[in-house]
């Protein structure tokens, strides 16, 4: 009698123990999913931020500068490195800072090598370097890992058959960089790039860090969990943007991501961010992207199917025709320009035929260097500026990019009152666009002529 009670007690005790261990396991596994946020919370993060536009302009491009100097991307990265005290988190589609086969003098990869050396030396300063990447066999990532960088591999092939094309930095959960430049020596010398660095902005950094955490947790995972830790839930989005001060001007901002599969709870999709910015434009929309192609290529039951991808095309049409918003589209004309680009662009332009107050202009940016490397001189920008907002992203406006590649975007909206003119980031980006638009590298007829040539030469050449 007595011993059965004892047995019962032992059984109950064992059950309670099991339960406790289970609970502990569940909680710890949830906790691993989003790592420590350094004690900064959305309540006490900093919203008084300083934003600067950074650009890389290849030496042999000459623009009329209108007296407004640009801050080089490389200076932006070095400033961020100077500020770093604890951690740097980097996502980049490429890791090619050292060009191994370049022997020209002066060495165009010098800036890249310098940056790489500084990244290698972070360990000696006690700064942690964390990198998320979809590259499987990168020499540079191996070298960095050997110098104490933590590298997490995200198998994008498995998730979407795409790539981790995001390009951003987070420094000490305080300062961030987002833009077109990635960890490629070309981004610091021969390719035209544009991005922003935001200082003292832990609120925005905290949210971008959650995107980074998402990538970080996909390491050695072969599925996307359906339940995520709260620590990857978006803090801000298109319906609840962060209210902040940018260079002492009131503004709102949020981070968007793609592809849809990578949008954790409450995260705004890149495409929706672009909609919102286009839809809230009142007078003008200036767009600068390498490629513009409203097509999406998907593999369906083993065969690849190309479909029309109307998402962005249709909001542009609506803005131009129904709201009378002036649209300018600056696209790069280069070796990889899809021949159908010209047809879609001609279709957009034809909307304004015989329509009063309708303006949609397209120009092609091209600059050819005498070299086999087709990316040299390329306008690699990926942004849009309107009368009240800026969108700076990682993707070209190509349907397939948004569908399969991971990227982030930053939306900044502003109240542009008259006294702010000339000082806001918005005015700065607009001036930059206008500089490029008016330059001799941007031509409206260029593409049309070459289009015929391109089509005549290789009609079946589809990307
Ligand atoms: C922010 O708040 C959290 C919790 O409320 C606290 O632990 C942390 O120390 C605070 N951080 C700063 C920088 O005030
Ligand atoms: C990885 O890169 C090294 C050096 O570039 C090369 O020798 C090796 O074949 C590559 N391995 C794979 C699996 O691609
Ligand atoms: C990524 O996933 C694909 C598809 O499952 C697999 O074939 C490949 O080996 C994986 N790559 C790595 C480096 O694990
Ligand atoms: C960031 O904030 C610190 C302390 O408030 C200040 O000293 C520093 O100048 C700020 N940096 C920028 C780039 O505004
Ligand atoms: C045409 O545009 C001008 C200036 O943007 C505006 O004042 C006018 O109302 C517009 N007219 C029509 C018919 O939309
Ligand atoms: C922007 O301006 C509008 C009208 O001028 C005003 O109602 C709104 O509160 C302002 N928003 C911010 C964030 O200052």
Image: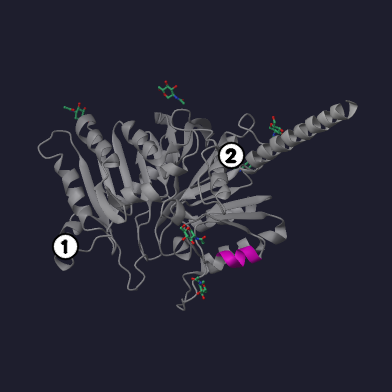
Looking at the image, residue 121 sits to the left or right of residue 74; the answer is right
Q: Nearer the viewer, residue 99 or 92?
A: 92
Disc 2 Cβ-to-ligand 1 distance below 8 Å: no
Q: Are marks 2 and 1 in contact (CB under 8 Å)?
A: no
Question: Closer to the camera, 153 or 275?
Answer: 153
According to the image, label 2 marks what residue? 206
Total tally of numbered discs in the picture: 2
Q: Answer with the quarter of the image where residue 441 lies.
A: bottom left
Location of the C terminus by quadrant is bottom left
Q: Which residue is mark 1?
A: 455
Q: Is residue 395 above or below residue 187?
A: above
Q: Quadrant of the N terminus?
A: top right
Query: What is the magenta range?
Result: 141-146
Residue 211 in sight from this viewpoint: yes
Q: Position of residue 250 (x, y in %)?
A: 49, 30
The alpha-carbon separation of the residues under discs 2 and 1 comes to 48 Å
Against 160, residue 285 (above or below) is above
Residue for point 73% across, 38% down: 21
- Classify 10 Å Cα crowding around label 2: few (below 14), some (14-19), many (20 and above): many
**Residue occupying image coordinates x 28% and y 33%:** 283
Residue pushed farthest front? Answer: 1
Is 364 on the left or on the right of 87, as rendered?
left
Q: Position of residue 12 (x, y in %)?
A: 78, 30
Magenta stretch mostly in which secondary structure? helix
x, y percentage for residue 195? 45, 49
**Image spot of residue 150 (x, y percent):** 63, 57
Query: Which residue occupies the foreground of this view, 4 or 257?
Result: 4
- Relative to residue 332, is residue 217 depicted above or below? above
Which residue is at a point 34% across and 47% down the rendered structure image? Answer: 433
Which of the 4 quarters of the picture holds residue 57?
A: bottom left
């Amino acid at each position: 009698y007595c011993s059965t009670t004892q047995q019962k007690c032992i059984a109950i005790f064992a059950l309670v123990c099991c339960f406790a261990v289970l609970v502990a396991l569940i909680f710890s596994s949830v906790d691993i999913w989003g790592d420590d946020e350094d004690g900064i919370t959305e309540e006490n993060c900093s919203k008084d931020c300083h934003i600067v536009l950074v650009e890389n302009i290849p030496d042999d491009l000459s623009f009329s500068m209108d007296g407004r100097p640009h801050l080089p991307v490389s200076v932006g990265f070095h400033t961020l490195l100077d500020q770093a005290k604890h951690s740097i988190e980097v996502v980049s589609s490429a890791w090619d800072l050292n060009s191994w086969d370049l022997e020209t003098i002066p060495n165009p990869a010098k800036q890249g090598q310098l940056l790489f050396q500084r990244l290698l030396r972070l360990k000696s300063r006690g700064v942690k370097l964390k990198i998320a990447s979809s590259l499987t066999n990168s020499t540079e990532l191996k070298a960095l890992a050997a110098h104490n960088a933590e590298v997490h591999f995200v198998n994008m092939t498995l998730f979407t058959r795409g790539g981790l094309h995001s390009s951003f930095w987070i420094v000490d959960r305080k300062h961030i960089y987002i833009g077109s430049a990635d960890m490629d020596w070309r981004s610091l010398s021969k390719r035209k790039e544009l991005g922003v660095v935001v200082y003292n902005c832990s609120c925005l950094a905290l949210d971008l860090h959650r995107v980074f955490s998402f990538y970080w947790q996909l390491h050695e995972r072969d599925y996307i969990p359906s339940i995520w830790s709260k620590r990857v839930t978006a803090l801000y989005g298109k319906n609840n943007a962060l209210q902040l001060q940018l260079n002492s001007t009131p503004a709102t901002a949020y981070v968007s991501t793609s592809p849809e599969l990578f949008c954790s709870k409450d995260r705004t999709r890149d495409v929706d961010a672009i909609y919102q910015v286009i839809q809230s434009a009142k007078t003008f929309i200036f767009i600068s992207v390498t490629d513009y192609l409203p097509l999406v290529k998907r593999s369906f039951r083993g065969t690849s199917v190309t479909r029309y991808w109307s998402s962005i095309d249709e909001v542009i049409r609506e803005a131009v025709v129904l709201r009378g918003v002036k649209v300018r589209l600056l696209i790069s004309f280069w070796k990889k320009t899809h021949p159908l680009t010209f047809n879609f662009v001609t279709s957009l332009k034809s909307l304004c035929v015989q329509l009063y107050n309708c303006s949609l202009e397209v120009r092609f940016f091209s600059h050819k260097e005498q070299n086999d490397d087709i990316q040299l001189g390329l306008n690699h920008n990926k942004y849009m500026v309107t009368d009240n907002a800026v969108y700076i992203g990682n993707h070209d406006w190509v349907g397939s990019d948004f569908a399969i590649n991971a990227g982030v975007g930053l939306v900044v909206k502003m109240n542009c009152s008259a006294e702010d003119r000339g000082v806001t980031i918005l005015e700065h980006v607009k001036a930059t666009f206008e500089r490029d638009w008016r330059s001799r590298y941007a031509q409206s007829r260029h593409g049309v002529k070459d289009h015929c040539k391109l089509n005549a030469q290789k009609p079946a050449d589809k990307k």
